[in-house]
Image (tube, rainbow, N blue to C red):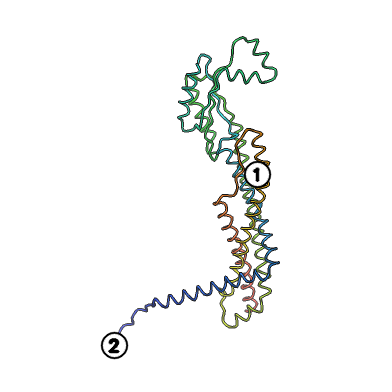
Amino acid sequence: MTDKRPPAKPRIVASHDLGRKFRVWLSQQKQAIDFSLKRLWFNPISAWITLIAIALALSLPTSMHVLVKNLQSLTHNNQSVPTISLFLKPKVTEQQANDLAELVKSQPEVLSTTVVTRDQALQDFKKIAGLADTLKTLGENPLPNIVVITPKMNDLGVTDADLEDFTKRLKTYKEVEDVQIDIEWIQRLRAILQIAERIVAVVAALLATTVLLVVGNTIRLDIENRKDEIRVTRLIGATNRYIRRPFLYGGLWLGLFGGFLSLLVVNIALLFLVEPVNKLSLLYGSDFNLGGIDLTTTLEVLIISASLGLVGAWLAVNRYLWESEVIND
């Protein structure tokens, strides 16, 4: 006997069903957000203690990161960057020195060039105690014309090998008698900044763990205070996702608001440093200015702090749900 029933039609989900499901989901998210914000509002002492702890933990690596970026800006602005000195042959005239400086300036490794004439060099040497009388005994000026080269040191991307190759090319010019460059200073500067960056990374990792523990402990205490409420909601059919949602938003707000507070702390600290740093800069004849927190760093701090709060809350509530399920089993 053959089955004459028509084939089953594929199930089509109506668009209004999808819309209804989305509205339900959106309503649940709104309820969780409202509830989590009210919990912070009605527990101000606990919330502020947690926020201050998070802010202090985040402000240290943030301030260290900003200071390292300011140190790196010294190399971007070519302040305190070692220069390359070309000592020209005695017969090279001042005009030839200027022509050579313009030629060298066209090289991709060069940011700027300055010509120090024989007369300028002589005047500088006379200012050094004990050398003025010695120079008088020589009769004529023994100093050559000098071309001072400022290399490009952006992000310390110029390696020792690049500088050595560039130095070898400079020695091939017929006007050049000798080339001097302080490679050791470049190596020290690079090593100092690399160490500083790693210190910031280590401190940031340790304090990020601290933020996770602080948020996790705060959420755990909140769960303990709401155990009876959670049991009731489970009895009426609430899922783990429904139970977890407000706690996750609570951790998110703690991390985000703690990040805002840490940025405020860092900016206030930088304001106290601006005046003494500017005075020190003027004493060294520099136009260096202490930079603050830029938009990129601000967004990074807020995203990282919010993520830490979310992860800390997720770990705390998942641990409770797992333990409660094990006990019930």
- Residue drawn at the location 55% of the way across and 27% of the way down: 84
Q: Quadrant of residue 52?
A: bottom right
Q: Position of residue 207 (x, y in %)?
A: 66, 55
The answer to whether the residue labelled 2 contacts the one labelled 1, judged by CB atoms less than 8 Å apart, is no
Q: Earlier in the sequence, mark 2 or mark 1?
A: 2
Q: How many residues crowd mark 2 within 10 Å: few (<14), some (14–19), many (20+)? A: few
Identified by mark 1, the residue type is Val
Give the SS element for disc 2. Answer: loop
Q: Is residue 310 above or below residue 72?
A: below
- Residue drawn at the location 60% of the way across and 36% of the way down: 287
Residue that lies at the very extreme toward the bottom in this rendered image: 1
In the image, 155 versus 95, the foreground residue is 95
Tag of residue 120: none
Q: Quadrant of residue 273?
A: top right
Label 2 or label 1, whichever lies nearer to me, is 1
- Residue drawn at the location 61% of the way across and 66% of the way down: 251
Q: Is residue 300 above or below residue 20?
A: above
Q: Position of residue 50 (x, y in %)?
A: 68, 63
Q: Is residue 35 left or right of residue 44?
A: left
Q: Is residue 4 left or right of residue 145?
A: left
Q: Is residue 259 above or below residue 34?
A: above
- Residue drawn at the location 57% of the way across and 25% of the way down: 180
Q: Position of residue 192 (x, y in %)?
A: 63, 40
Residue of label 1: 274
In the image, 227 versus 266, the foreground residue is 266
Tag of residue 4: 2
Q: Quadrant of the N terminus?
A: bottom left
